[in-house]
Structures are given as C-alpha cells and as structure tokens.
Amino acid sequence: MNGVAGLEIARETAPRTGLEPLTALVADELQMVNRLILERMESEVSLIPQMAGHIVAAGGKRLRPVLTLASARLCGYQGQRHLNLAACVEFIHTATLLHDDVVDQSDLRRGLSTANALWGNQPSVLVGDFLFSRAFQLMVADGSLKVLKILSDASAVIAEGEVQQLLISNDTATSEKDYLAVVGAKTAALFSAACRIGAVVGERPEEEEMALESYGRNFGIAFQIIDDLLDFSAHQAELGKTVGDDFREGKITLPVILAFARADEDERRFWRRCLEDTEQTDADLGQAIALMNRHGVLKDTAAYARAYASDARDALAIFPASPVKREMLELIDFCVERAY
Amino acid sequence: MNGVAGLEIARETAPRTGLEPLTALVADELQMVNRLILERMESEVSLIPQMAGHIVAAGGKRLRPVLTLASARLCGYQGQRHLNLAACVEFIHTATLLHDDVVDQSDLRRGLSTANALWGNQPSVLVGDFLFSRAFQLMVADGSLKVLKILSDASAVIAEGEVQQLLISNDTATSEKDYLAVVGAKTAALFSAACRIGAVVGERPEEEEMALESYGRNFGIAFQIIDDLLDFSAHQAELGKTVGDDFREGKITLPVILAFARADEDERRFWRRCLEDTEQTDADLGQAIALMNRHGVLKDTAAYARAYASDARDALAIFPASPVKREMLELIDFCVERAY
C-alpha cells in the first residue's frame, strides 16, 4: 500500500481509520481503564484531580493503554490485571507530558492550553511527580515484580532519553545515531513496555513476550519518526494542523539531520541560523520544507519509518491470525502512511 | 534538658553533636551506601551523573539513609538489603530536592548554587525524574513488595504534600491543621518510611515496624517545625547562617501562623503585606522576629516540636537499650534543641 492509496482507503471506510478499529475491539475494557484512571487520580488536594483531569481526560488517544489491552488480548489473557496496568502506563505517559510541557515551555497541546500555561510550571512539576508515584502504586498493587522491573526500567530509560534530547536540541551536528537513541528511549521504551506486559500478564513464553516487546519498540520508533516528519508536512498544513512547532524550537529531528547532511554551505548557514540561533522569519519554514523536498528528505524519512514499521509487523508473525492481530498490524500501516 | 543546657553539652563534647554520633555507629555501612549512590547515578548521558553528583555528593547530611541504617541495626538486621534501600531513600530525597528548587526558584542550597541555578530548570526536572525512576529500580531489585508499597505510598504522599504546600503559600489564613498536614506529607512521610523499612528487612513483628514508623513520623514533624522556626532565629543569625529565606518567599510556617493568630489589626496588615503581597523592606524581618518574640511565638513553636519529639522518643520504648537506640534518642534531642 503506498501513501496515497492508504489515505484513500482511510477515507472510504470512514470510522475505520487510525486507532479506532483497534480501540473498538477493546472498547469495553478501555472504558474500565478510563474509570480506573479517573478513580486513581483522586486526591484530597483538589488541584491534583483538576490538573490531572485536564491532561488525562481532555483528549488523548489512549494509544499506550490500548496497546496493553490489545497485547493482552493477543495473548489470550482472560483476567483483569491488564486494566490496572494499562491505567498505570497512561499515568506514566501523562506525568511525562506534564514535565515535557514545562521543559518545552509549551502553551498548547492537542489544540488545548497546556497545564503549565493554565496553572504554571510549579504545580505541573509536582502533579507530574504525583502521577508518576501513583503509577508505581498501581504497579505495586498488581504485585508482579517482573512487571515492576519492566516499567521501572522503562521509566528510567524515558528520563534518560528526555535529558539526552535536551542536550542535542539546537545542535545541527547531531547524528542519526543520537537521534535514534533519543527516540528509542523517550518514545519507544514505553510503547515496548506497554505491549510486553500484555504477554507477562498472559503468562506467555519468553518468545511471545519478546515479540511484543519488538512490536512495541519498532512501532514506537516508526511512530515518533512520522510525528517528527509531520512537523514539515505540507499535507498536514492543508488539513489545518500546526506545522513547524519543532522547527521553531530548534528541535533536531531526522528530517533536519538528513537535510543538514545533504546541504551545501549556504544551506548549512540557513539551518544553523534557524535551528542553532533560532533566528527565524515567517518565510523560513517554507524554505525548510522546500530544501527538504529538493533533497528527497521527506521521502527518505518516511522510508526510515517504514523500515521500523516492517520490523514491527514481522515481530507479530509468531501469533496466529485473529481480529486483534489484524488491527495491530493495520495500526502500524495507518501510523506510517499518515505522513501523506 | 532545656535549650541552653543542650547547647552547652553540645559545645563541651565537640564531635558528639548533631547527626555525628549516630552516623559514626553506622559509618562503614554509610560508606557502602555512598558507593552505591555513586554507582547507581551512572548513565551514558553524562549530564545525569554530573548534576546528580552535584546535589547528592556535594554535602547533604544523609539523614534519611542514616535513619534506615540505624533502624535496621536497632532491629538486629544482619544482611545487606538495607544498604540498597538506604540509597533508594536518598535518591527519592534528592529527586524531591531537585524539583523543589525548580518550584521555589532557589539559587542556593546549603550554601552552594542549586542545580537549577547552574544548569537551568529543564534538566533539573528531567534529572529529578531519572533519580526517582532509579529509586524505583533499586526497590524492585530488592524484591520486597512490602517495601515497594511503603516507599511508593510515601512518594505519592510527598508529592501531594508538595502540591498542598504550594496552595497554602502566601495565604495568611492557613490553619495549623493545614500546616501540619503539609509537614506530615512532604517531610515526615519519607522519615517514617526510611525508619520503617529497617524493621521490614529485619523481619520484625508489626509492633516494632509501627514503632519505627511512629519514631520517623514524629521526628520528621519535629524536625520540620524546628527547620521552619530557625528561619526566624536570632541565634542562627548570630552563627552566620541565613535567616528569613522562607519569610521573603512568603512561606506559611507554624511561627507565622501563630504570630498571625495573636496579631492585632495593625500587625495583621504587616503580615499580609510581607507574606501575601511579599512587599518587604530590609527592616521587616527584624520586625517579624520582634513580633514573634512579643507574642511568645518562637517559644511556643519550639514547644510544638518538643511534643512531637516526645512522641518520637516514646515510640522507641519497646526496644531494649543499645548504643544505636541511645543515639537515635539523642538525635531527636539535638534536632529539637538546635533552635536555641
């Protein structure tokens, strides 16, 4: 399926796009997870449920908890433990978002004011800490040391990735390797853990556990590469979505790294001014996209994502055909092809 | 022992002051804990050990890990688990300090530049997250779900207390009850957990575990009350230590609450200007201390601390006499009497 065909298919079968088909398969369970999330963000300190509610409840695709639910289903798990753990995964993600918005000084997320814009940085830091602690309480209540190890390791890796991302920001000398290390840590580690715990609660053999780990990790990397690509997507701009946020902040992502590697001296001066000095005019984003198209950067970035997506797809080969497997594969295709 | 006599004793026996006698008893173990702390803050992302090293290694009394080591000793524990857990407690504390300094916008801690002053708020938030995750990895490596529950509960309570503290800042209508709730959460929860896990690793009966919980909790509250009192201590000022930091920020602490409750209308206007509007002149701290002395506030604040210290002391009654018990009791006396 090429990009344009993928989009056509998505348009033809209106509700069957994006995360929806997979979410529909686990809809009842996801509703229980949403209830758990609301219950477990309660606190006598009323600002905590207020802020957490703003970020957890208001929107969010629940992609990571859906991955936990789907993975458990794929593994034939019949119990209830995955509900608690899916909520826990979403709490870790939400804590990260709260802290990310403080670090990035973001005012908007998914078109809504960020918690730090509404309440300030101070409670965002502290409520993030609370949600993170709450995530650990949920894991401890689950009682599996194996799950605790997977999720505490993932948390440490995420934090390392976030620090590393901060260190490479505005540095046009960043290598693809460094970029992929950041993406593997800050995004793919939680995707991978979210999927893997589905096999752990299902008490499946190591092989299936590692297959889901690989699905989550490779999907996470592909997902983040596409997310970074969309910042420069003319198609996104046509759809009325924001483009250029990362560019304006001087974030170093794969399209930028490829464009810089293929740039002549004039173009390098352009990239350095825009990304290192973050001195930009209104015309610069258009110029950046034009340079990327001239050097085939956007196409090649998508090819990187497709390679990881392909590994993610292969990882599921050991599981027999089932509706949930089909939708887990479809989800990858959708995420990779949404770049067009 | 009254305050002045306490000071005399401290002066006479020079090295036997403060935390030193208790630390000396567990010196070998503390050295191993320090090695573990250095080892476990390692990361390929070099900024992490740099920043963590700055705050963990540079000073710090290691009060909380010493409490874990001492409690384990009191319970006759002979193994090694308490070393790992003492390091974990210090990591949680350090993560909290990093985030506190961001929230308070502090430039100095223990006379040194804070991490956020040196490296900025962004890495302070993220390295705090890393240390917190690392703490959980250390707990998971220990493998006791009971310890995990105690420390994850404490972490959530600490975060709640920090948010609550933010909400009461600059509010002169804060009650003693609210203040004590904040202190119980942000300070006493970790003291209490640090002590309690000494009994857990020692596999002692519930009664001893709860006795150490009570020792830690009451000691923690007394410790924080005295810390808040010292901000207005003329004696501290004579010793060349900083006073008035909390006052300048408009922090609402027990001495302020008592002074405001006993104030006439003129004085209330003074407190509101200084603490709610934080409009202060150089003379205001002196005036605040004078008002506190006039209303017997400093004396009565110390009496509150002594009441909690007394409960902490009583909690250890069930343990037979031993050198470590004697020094755990002495430590309380020192902390309470340092106000003079």
Image (cartoon, coloured by chain):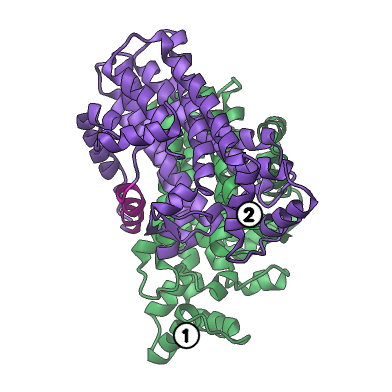
Chain colours: A green, B purple
Q: Quadrant of the N terminus of chain B?
A: top left
Q: Which residue is mark 1?
A: A273
Q: Chain of mark 2?
A: B
Q: Residue at horizontal 70%, vertical 30%?
A: A32
Q: Secondary structure at mark 1?
A: helix
Q: Which residue is mark 2?
A: B250
Q: Quadrant of residue A36?
A: top right
Q: Nearer the viewer, residue B238 or A246?
A: B238
The image position of residue B235, as x and y in percent, is: 45, 48
Given the image, on which type of amino acid does mark 2 rest?
Gly
Q: Chain of mark 1?
A: A
In this rendering, is residue B199 above or below B171?
above
Given the image, on which type of amino acid does mark 1 rest?
Arg
The image position of residue B107, as x and y in percent, is: 46, 61
Residue A170 magenta: no
Q: Label 1 vs label 2: CA separation?
A: 43 Å
